[in-house]
């Protein structure tokens, strides 16, 4: 799985590339790294690993590598995660006591405004439900 990051420069020691978000990068599944510099003379550099890139570009801590987790993610496990969620979710309806807790599923200390995770899971599953083809699997 690839991970994207960006280089955040807090101080421009060389005076050449400015501060802020100065480059975008990817750590590829084999551990090699590609960095794409922003700006008028943008360039692309490849490294054998993140340590090498950090040693050369880190400028003694003035430039930080910030991972953008959540972007460019590998969602290939998502269908299986949905299926597991479906199997782990109790099909029974929630049953709330006078304190607002769900007695049916054991979430008895829900705070006002919180919903039972089983109800949330069923809503999520309904949003992602595959179109039914009439068969019962
Ligand atoms: Zn519930």
Image (tube, helix red, strand yellow):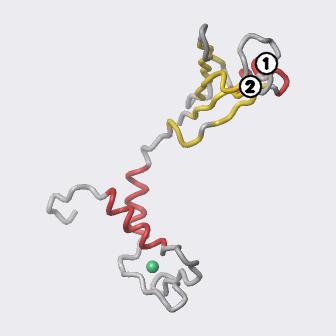
**Secondary-structure class at tag 1:** loop
Q: Which residue is drawn at 82% across and 28% down?
A: 61
Residues under numbered marks 1 and 2 in contact, where contact means CB atoms less than 8 Å apart: yes
Q: Distance from label 1 to label 2 (Cα)?
A: 7 Å
Q: Residue at x 60, y 29 (%)?
A: 27
Reply above or below: 116 against 125. Answer: below
Res 3 quadrant in image: top right
Q: Report ligand 1 position as a quadrant.
A: bottom left
Q: Which of 52 and 72 is in front in this view?
A: 72
Q: Residue 9 carries which label?
A: 2
Horizontal placement of 1 versus 10: left or right?
A: left
Q: Classify 10 Å Cα crowding around label 2: few (below 14), some (14-19), many (20 and above).
A: many
Reply above or below: 53 against 66. Answer: above
Q: Which residue is drawn at 49% across and 74% down?
A: 115
Q: Nearer the viewer, residue 9 or 56?
A: 9
Q: Position of residue 110 (x, y in %)?
A: 56, 79
Res 41 quadrant in image: top right
Q: Where is residue 17 in the image (x, y as percent from the top left)?
A: 71, 14
Horizontal placement of 62 versus 107: left or right?
A: right
| Residue matched to label 1 | 12
Question: Does label 1 point to a residue whose CB lies under 8 Å from ligand 1?
Answer: no
Quarter of the image with the C terminus is bottom left
Q: Which residue is drawn at 59% across and 82% down?
A: 109
Q: Where is residue 25 in the image (x, y as percent from the top left)?
A: 60, 25
């Amino acid at each position: 799985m690839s991970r994207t990051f960006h280089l955040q420069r807090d101080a421009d020691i060389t005076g050449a590339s400015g501060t802020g978000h100065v480059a975008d990068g990817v750590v590829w599944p084999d551990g090699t790294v590609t960095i794409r510099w922003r700006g008028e003379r943008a360039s692309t550099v490849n490294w054998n690993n993140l340590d090498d890139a950090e040693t050369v570009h880190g400028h003694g801590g003035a430039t930080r590598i910030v991972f953008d987790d959540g972007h460019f993610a590998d969602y290939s496990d998502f269908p299986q995660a949905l299926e597991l969620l479906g199997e782990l979710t109790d099909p029974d309806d929630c049953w709330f006591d006078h304190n607002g807790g769900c007695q049916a599923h054991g979430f008895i200390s829900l705070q006002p405004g919180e919903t039972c995770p089983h109800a949330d899971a069923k809503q999520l599953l309904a949003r992602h439900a595959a179109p039914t083809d009439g068969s019962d699997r």
